[in-house]
C-alpha cells in the first residue's frame, strides 16, 4: 500500500449562520470553508457567481495593445498565422483565435506543431515557413513565452509576433534575484508575466485567447459578450482538459461553459459527444477529463492535432461524424499502448529494485514519446514518487515527468538545466530533452539533489469531516450540486468513518475490480459500501485488522429510473 497521511479539516466559521444566510445545510457551509472560501462575498461568488463576475479582459497586461494591433492588421488585409499547441488547451485556443479572427474578416490560418517532428511551441522551421508563406503576423497561443530566440529570429525576418500564453515566464537567478526573460514580441499577453494586474493568473491558454477575442470584438463594435457566448464552451473544455484549478474565475468559466456545451451548436463537438455515447446526458467536468478530452488529445499524441482542430472547424455533420469516430478509435489505441508502457515501467522498477529511489527515472527506449507523460502519471500514482519517463527521440532522449505536492519539478530541473537541450513545465509536470551521454548524470543529480523526506512521500488525504453514513440524506446530497464543478482545486467532498466491520463481500467487474461490501458501522447501522480498485488487497487488510477506518464519498446512483444512495470507499487504514 502507498503511504498516506490523513488530515481532517479544522477550519473555523459560523457554519450555522452561513447556512441560514445562504439557505444551505451547515455541512455545505463547512465544505465551502474547507476549500479556503472566506467572507460572504466570496461564498456568494462560489455558490452563485455568474458570467458578470468574470474579470474584464482589459485588465490583462497586453490585451488592449494586442487587440488594437490585430484590428489594424485585419483592416490592412495582412496575413495572420496562428501557431498553437498539440494538446486540448492549444487546440481550443487555436480554434477560438482562428474562428474569431475569420468572423472579423481576417486572412488567418493555423499551424499546430507536430509533437514528434516539431516538438512543443515555436521553432526556427515554423518561423521560416511563415516568412516563406508571406505571413505578416504570427499569433501564438498556449506557447511562446519561452521562445525568445525563435521570436528574435522572426523579428529578423520582418515578422510581427504577438504572444498569448499562460505558462510561467522563464528566468535567470543570481544571488537569489530573479531576472525574467520576456521574449521581444510586439505584444506579450500572459497573466503570469511581471506587472500584470489581472486578478487571477490561473487561467488556461484558451481562456487567454477568449479574453483577447472579447477585447477584439469589443474594439470591432460587436461587443465582448458575443465572443463570450461563441467561445465560452471551448475555454471551459480547455480549462478542465489542461487540469487548471477550478477556483475563482475558472470555476465560473467551467460552470457556465458546461451548460453551453450541453447544447453546443459546434458540429464537431456535437459529433464527438454522440460518438462517445453522451447524447442526452448531463455533461460534467469528468466527461471532459476522461471521455471527450482524451479523444482530442489522442490526435496530437499518435497522429497530428490538426485532426482535432479540423473536427472543431468542421461545418458538415457527416464529415464531423467521420472525424469524431477516427479520434475515438485513436484514443482506444492510445489506451492500449499506455497500458503496455505502464506494465513495462512497473517491471523495470521491480526488477531493478528502484522502489527506494526518491525520484523514479525510467528509460523506456521503445515507448511512444507522446505517452511518456501519461505513463509517468500512472507510475507516480502507484509509487508516490516524482516520476520521469524517458524514451528515444530523433535528437537524443526525450521525456516527461509528473510530480508530487512536495516537489517542484520545474524548479528541480532548473538546477541541472546545463544537461538539457530543452526543458520546461511547472511544479507538477515537466518535459525535457537531453543528449544520450547526459542520461547518467541526469539520473544521478536528480537523486542526490533531492531533499524529499519520508513524510513528503506520504500522500496527503484531505478529509472534510468525520461523518456517520446515516447523515448522508437525499436532501443533503442534492445540495452537493452547489459545489460543482469539482476537480483540481475544488475537490469532491470526502468524509471519514472509524471502526467499520465487514459482514459480507461480493466482487464484480470484468477484471474483478468492483467490490460491494455489507458492513456494520460503529453506530450499529448495517449498509453497503462500494470500492473500485484492488479488491484482494482491501479484503486482506480488512481480515487482518477486523475493523477499518475508511474515507468515503456519498452519491446518488441512478439505474433504470430508480436511485439510491451509494457510499464509495476512497481510502482505508
Image (tube, rainbow, N blue to C red):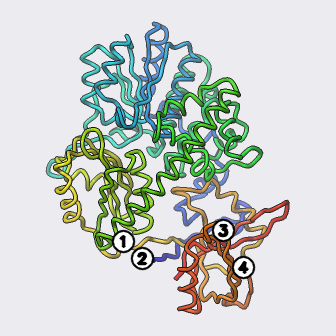
Distance from Cα at disc 1 to Cα at disc 4: 32 Å
**Mark 3 residue crowding within 10 angstroms, few (<14) / some (14–19) / many (20+):** few
Residue 162 falls in image quadrant: top left
Q: What numbered label is drawn on residue 513?
A: none
Q: Residue at x 58, y 80 (%)?
A: 550
Distance from Cα at disc 3 to Cα at disc 1: 31 Å
Q: Is residue 249 visible?
A: no
Residue 50: x and y in percent read 65, 43
Residue 3: x and y in percent read 42, 76
Q: In the rendered structure, are the residues bearing label 3 and label 2 in contact, judged by CB atoms less than 8 Å apart? A: no
Q: What numbered label is drawn on residue 457?
A: 1
Q: Residue at x 49, y 8 (%)?
A: 75
From the viewer's perspective, is residue 551 above or below residue 173?
below
Q: What numbered label is drawn on residue 3?
A: 2
Quadrant where the N terminus is found in the figure: bottom left
Q: In the rendered structure, are the residues bearing label 3 and label 1 in contact, judged by CB atoms less than 8 Å apart? A: no
**Mark 1 residue crowding within 10 angstroms, few (<14) / some (14–19) / many (20+):** many
Q: Residue reaching furthest top? A: 76
Q: What numbered label is drawn on residue 528?
A: 4
Q: In the rendered structure, are the residues bearing label 1 and label 4 in contact, judged by CB atoms less than 8 Å apart? A: no
Residue 104: x and y in percent read 56, 16
- Tell me which label, 4 or 2, sits earlier in the chain: 2
From the viewer's perspective, is residue 329 above or below residue 128?
below
Amino acid at each position: 500500500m502507498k503511504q498516506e497521511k490523513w488530515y481532517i479539516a479544522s477550519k473555523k466559521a459560523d457554519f450555522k449562520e452561513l447556512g441560514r444566510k445562504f439557505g444551505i445545510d451547515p455541512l455545505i457551509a463547512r465544505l465551502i470553508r474547507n476549500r479556503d472560501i472566506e467572507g460572504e462575498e466570496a461564498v456568494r461568488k462560489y455558490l452563485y457567481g455568474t458570467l458578470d463576475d468574470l474579470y474584464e479582459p482589459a485588465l490583462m497586461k497586453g490585451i488592449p495593445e494586442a487587440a488594437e494591433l490585430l484590428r489594424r492588421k485585419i483592416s490592412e488585409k495582412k496575413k495572420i498565422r496562428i501557431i498553437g499547441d498539440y494538446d486540448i488547451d492549444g487546440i481550443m485556443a487555436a480554434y477560438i483565435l482562428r474562428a474569431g479572427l475569420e468572423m472579423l474578416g481576417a486572412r488567418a490560418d493555423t499551424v499546430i506543431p507536430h509533437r514528434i517532428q516539431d516538438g512543443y511551441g515555436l521553432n526556427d522551421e515554423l518561423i521560416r515557413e511563415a516568412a516563406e508563406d508571406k505571413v505578416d503576423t504570427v499569433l501564438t497561443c498556449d506557447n511562446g513565452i519561452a521562445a525568445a530566440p525563435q521570436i528574435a529570429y522572426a523579428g529578423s525576418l520582418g515578422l510581427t509576433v504577438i504572444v498569448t500564453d499562460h505558462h510561467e515566464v522563464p528566468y535567470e537567478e543570481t544571488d537569489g534575484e530573479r531576472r525574467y526573460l520576456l521574449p521581444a514580441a510586439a505584444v506579450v499577453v500572459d497573466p503570469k508575466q511581471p506587472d500584470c494586474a489581472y486578478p487571477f493568473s490561473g487561467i488556461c491558454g484558451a481562456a487567454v485567447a477568449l479574453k483577447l477575442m472579447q477585447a477584439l470584438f469589443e474594439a470591432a463594435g460587436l461587443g465582448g459578450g458575443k465572443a463570450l457566448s461563441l467561445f465560452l464552451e471551448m475555454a471551459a473544455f480547455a480549462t478542465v482538459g489542461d487540469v487548471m484549478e477550478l477556483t475563482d474565475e475558472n470555476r465560473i468559466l467551467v460552470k457556465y461553459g458546461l451548460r453551453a456545451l450541453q447544447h453546443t451548436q459546434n458540429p464537431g463537438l456535437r459529433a464527438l459527444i454522440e460518438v462517445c455515447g453522451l447524447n442526452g446526458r448531463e455533461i460534467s467536468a469528468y466527461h471532459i477529463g476522461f471521455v471527450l478530452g482524451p479523444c482530442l488529445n489522442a490526435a496530437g499524441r499518435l497522429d497530428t492535432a490538426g485532426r482535432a482542430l479540423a473536427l472543431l472547424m468542421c461545418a458538415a455533420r457527416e464529415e464531423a461524424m467521420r472525424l469524431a469516430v477516427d479520434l475515438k478509435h485513436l484514443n482506444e489505441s492510445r489506451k492500449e499502448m499506455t497500458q503496455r508502457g505502464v506494465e513495462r515501467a512497473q517491471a523495470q522498477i521491480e526488477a531493478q529494485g528502484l522502489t527506494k529511489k526518491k525520484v523514479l527515472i525510467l528509460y523506456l527506449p521503445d515507448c511512444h514519446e507522446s505517452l511518456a507523460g501519461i505513463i509517468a502519471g500512472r507510475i507516480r500514482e502507484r509509487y508516490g514518487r516524482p516520476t520521469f519517463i524517458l524514451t528515444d527521440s530523433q535528437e537524443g532522449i526525450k521525456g516527461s515527468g509528473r510530480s508530487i505536492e512536495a516537489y517542484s519539478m520545474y524548479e528541480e530541473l532548473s538546477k541541472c538545466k546545463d544537461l538539457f537541450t530543452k526543458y520546461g513545465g511547472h511544479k507538477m509536470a515537466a518535459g525535457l530533452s537531453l543528449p544520450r551521454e547526459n542520461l547518467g548524470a541526469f539520473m544521478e543529480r536528480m537523486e542526490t539533489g533531492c531533499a524529499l523526506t519520508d513524510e513528503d512521500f506520504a500522500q496527503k488525504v484531505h478529509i472534510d469531516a468525520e461523518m456517520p453514513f446515516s447523515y448522508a440524506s437525499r436532501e443533503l446530497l442534492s445540495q452537493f450540486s452547489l459545489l460543482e464543478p469539482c476537480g483540481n482545486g475544488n475537490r469532491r467532498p470526502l468524509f471519514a468513518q472509524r471502526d467499520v466491520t465487514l459482514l459480507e463481500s461480493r466482487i464484480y467487474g470484468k477484471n474483478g475490480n468492483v467490490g460491494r461490501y455489507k458492513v456494520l458501522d460503529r453506530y450499529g447501522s448495517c449498509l453497503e459500501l462500494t470500492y473500485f480498485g484492488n479488491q484482494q488487497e482491501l479484503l486482506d487488510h480488512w481480515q487482518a485488522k477486523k475493523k477499518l477506518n475508511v474515507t468515503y464519498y456519498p452519491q446518488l446512483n441512478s439505474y433504470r429510473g430508480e436511485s439510491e444512495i451509494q457510499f464509495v470507499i476512497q481510502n482505508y487504514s
